[in-house]
């Protein structure tokens, strides 16, 4: 049986959470209202800054023309592939580097240089090597998120509690046993944190790739809208992108809860 104080504490937590959500919604509604009012009153240039109503109408038109969910799915599909590849490859490479300090010392300068290099500069080379297709987009996204995954996961591995490592070493645990029973479980929070970063970085890479080569996807809609000076389409693409990004973030949060519950 829970005490009365604990029940009051839980009730207070729920109330505070409800107030936070309501405040967030009210702020969003207020900003949309102000934007629409300024546009309709010609205080701002509606042609350049668009308006919420025009953006909604543009999204409805995309839906009626069967261009909405098709473009969303293409971007989501490319993001999922690059996200999964970056997470798996980055974690595997981090494990290899953790197992071999010599290899890490050799690779570390290259990781730093590649991480600081603007990946869009490699776009023309990627297109020449892979062609103007989905492979180029995925590689672009992979280049952006892979290095971050490697550095974050490796940093978590090497910062594992030294006393626990010494304890396992005293029992003559092998590298594999230490990795399986200590390093990876101890760094669940690091891996999940990296997943959160990877969602955004993979999406950024996909949009950059779609700007360069794609003829479909959310990035293509934004790029095409800017080329024909259709700012309504540009803003619609940005709003769709924000929604997709938020939904993918919620999926990662769900994965986090599952990992924590099973840990």
Image (cartoon, grey):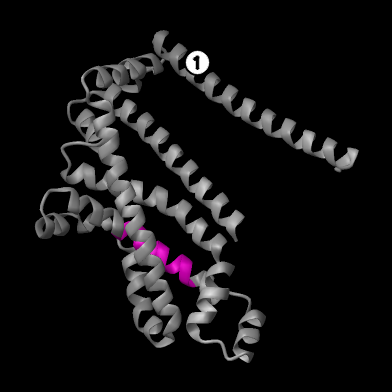
Q: Residue furthest top?
A: 41
| Residue 64 in the figure: left or right of residue 94 | left
Above or below, 239 relative to 60:
below
Residue 129 position in % (x across, y down): 11, 60
Q: Quadrant of the C terminus?
A: bottom right
| Residue 19 in the figure: left or right of residue 9 | left
Q: Residue furthest right?
A: 4
- Residue behind mark 1: 33
From the image, give the main secondary structure of the stretch colored magenta: helix
Which residue is drawn at the image coordinates 30% and 58% (left, top)?
142
Tell me where residue 38 sits by quadrant.
top left
Which residue is drawn at the image coordinates 55% and 62% (left, top)?
188
Residue 54 position in % (x across, y down): 34, 15
Can residue 47 be seen by looking at this rendering? Answer: no
| Residue 244 in the figure: left or right of residue 120 | right
Q: Which residues are magenta?
A: 143-154
Residue 200 is a magenta residue = no
Residue 242 position in % (x across, y down): 41, 35
What SS does tag 1 mark?
Answer: helix
Tell me where residue 212 sits by quadrant.
top left
Tell me where residue 56 sits by quadrant.
top left
């Amino acid at each position: 049986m829970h005490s009365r104080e604990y029940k009051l504490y839980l009730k207070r937590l729920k109330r505070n959470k409800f107030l936070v959500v309501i405040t967030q919604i009210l702020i969003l509604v207020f900003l949309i209202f102000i934007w629409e009012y300024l546009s309709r009153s010609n205080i701002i240039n509606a042609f350049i800054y668009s308006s919420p109503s025009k953006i909604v109408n543009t999204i409805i038109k995309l839906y009626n023309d069967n261009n909405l969910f098709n473009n969303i799915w293409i971007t989501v599909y490319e993001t999922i592939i690059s996200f999964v590849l970056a997470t798996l490859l980055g974690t595997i490479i981090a494990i290899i580097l953790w197992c071999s300090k010599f290899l890490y010392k050799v690779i570390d300068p290259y990781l730093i240089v590649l991480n600081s290099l603007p990946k869009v500069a490699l776009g023309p080379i990627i297109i020449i090597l892979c062609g103007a297709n989905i492979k180029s987009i995925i590689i672009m996204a992979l280049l952006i998120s892979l290095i971050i995954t490697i550095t974050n996961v490796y940093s978590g591995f090497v910062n594992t509690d030294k006393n626990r490592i010494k304890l396992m070493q005293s029992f003559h645990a092998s590298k594999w046993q230490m990795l399986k029973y200590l390093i990876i479980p101890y760094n669940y929070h690091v891996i999940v944190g990296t997943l959160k970063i990877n969602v955004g970085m993979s999406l950024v890479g996909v949009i950059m790739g779609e700007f360069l080569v794609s003829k479909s996807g959310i990035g293509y809609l934004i790029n095409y809208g800017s080329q024909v000076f259709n700012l309504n389409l540009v803003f619609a693409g940005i709003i769709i992108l924000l929604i997709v990004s938020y939904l993918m973030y919620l999926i990662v949060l769900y994965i986090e809860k599952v990992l924590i519950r099973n840990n």
